[in-house]
Image: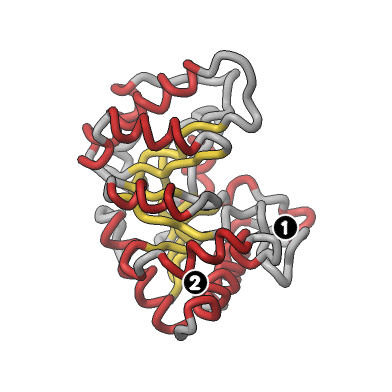
């Protein structure tokens, strides 16, 4: 059974997709997706996210504030640690740096990132890292804050091999999304060929970034199988081997997640 290691079940457009959160999860199960991790982007929607997945035993959660969120609650370390005590929560994030969508002095992003890293260490739950056009500073902050003490995953990885190596040196996993199926993503495909199998995860980041053959449509957890199939093709490996490895990696990293 595959695992979608990063999705946003609560943010999917069910008018376009049809059905509701439970039907999306059921469809994923029908397509061989055993578990999913529903990732927090802000604290305003966090309670409703938990409510959406509370009766879904195969769906886990994270808690955190996305780097582009500016207008809502900006939690301190103690608040994040307290929220992470929920038995659904297996990770802190998503957190990180995004210089693509935010402009000006972004020290507030770096400060928030540092707080999330400290909360992860205190709660003993790994980090989910978002980075966009900020790879050098992302690695720098992770190094400075000794994020290797807790580890985590570089979600929706879209950077180069050097950045992947630096992240893995800090104990982080590399997660591939539907981007790896795009014809234009040759550099990323080369990274997918090189990352050791025991350091790899797969994800959808649904409802965004649907893989080929659904590119441009609403993404959903069931489609993570297309990511695994592409990686198997790139590595001249079997889908079964990619599935087994990424599933084992997920439970190794998110050690509080129950199978």
User: In the depicted view, which residue is nearer to us: 145 or 193?
Assistant: 193
Figure quadrant of residue 209 = bottom right
How is colour applied across the structure in the image? secondary structure
Residue 159 is left or right of residue 100, and the answer is left
Q: Position of residue 53 (x, y in %)?
A: 49, 51
Quadrant occupied by the N terminus:
bottom left
Residue 171 is left or right of residue 4, and the answer is left
Q: Is residue 170 visible?
A: yes
Nearer-N-terminus badge (1/2): 2
Q: Is residue 97 above or below residue 49?
A: above
SS under mark 2: strand
Residue in the image at 47% along x and 20% along y: 74
Question: How much space separates mark 1 and mark 2, taking CA atoms?
Answer: 17 Å
User: In the depicted view, which residue is nearer to us: 168 or 226?
Assistant: 168
Q: Is residue 127 above or below residue 195?
A: above
User: In the depicted view, which residue is nearer to us: 213 or 187?
Assistant: 187
Figure quadrant of residue 86 = top left
Residue 101 is left or right of residue 233, and the answer is right
Q: Residues within 10 Å of mark 2 (few under 14, many from 20)?
A: many
Q: Position of residue 232 (x, y in %)?
A: 50, 79
Question: Which labelled disc corresponds to residue 218?
Answer: 1
* Residue furthest to the top: 105
Looking at the rendered structure, the number of numbered marks drawn on it comes to: 2
Residue 193 is left or right of residue 149, and the answer is right
Residue in the image at 39% along x and 81% along y: 241
Q: Position of residue 114 (x, y in %)?
A: 35, 25
Residue in the image at 58% along x and 20% along y: 70
Q: Position of residue 87 (x, y in %)?
A: 31, 46
- Disc 2: which residue: 33
SS under mark 1: loop
Quadrant occupied by the C terminus:
bottom left
Q: Is residue 148 above or below residue 181?
A: above
């Amino acid at each position: 059974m595959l695992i979608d290691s990063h999705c946003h079940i609560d943010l999917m457009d069910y008018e376009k997709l049809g059905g509701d959160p439970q039907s999306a999860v059921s469809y994923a199960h029908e397509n061989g997706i055993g578990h999913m991790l529903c990732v927090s982007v802000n604290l305003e929607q966090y309670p409703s996210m938990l409510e959406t997945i509370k009766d879904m035993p195969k769906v886990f959660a994270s808690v955190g504030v996305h780097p582009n969120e500016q207008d809502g609650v900006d939690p301190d370390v103690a608040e994040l640690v307290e929220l992470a005590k929920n038995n659904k929560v297996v990770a802190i994030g998503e957190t990180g740096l995004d210089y693509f969508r935010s402009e000006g002095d972004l020290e507030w992003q770096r400060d928030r990132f540092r707080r999330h890293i400290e909360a992860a260490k205190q709660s003993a739950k790994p980090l989910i890292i978002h980075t966009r056009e900020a790879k050098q500073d992302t690695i720098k902050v992770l190094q400075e804050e000794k994020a290797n003490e807790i580890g985590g995953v570089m979600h929706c990885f879209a950077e180069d091999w050097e950045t992947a190596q630096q992240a893995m040196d800090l104990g982080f996993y590399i997660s591939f999304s539907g981007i790896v199926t795009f014809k234009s993503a040759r550099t990323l495909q080369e990274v997918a060929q090189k990352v050791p199998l025991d350091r790899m995860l797969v994800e959808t980041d649904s409802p965004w970034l649907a893989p080929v053959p659904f590119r441009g449509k609403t993404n959903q957890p069931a489609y993570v199988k297309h990511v695994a199939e592409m990686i198997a093709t790139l590595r001249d490996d079997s889908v079964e081997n990619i599935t087994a490895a990424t599933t084992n990696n997920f439970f190794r990293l998110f050690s509080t997640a129950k199978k």
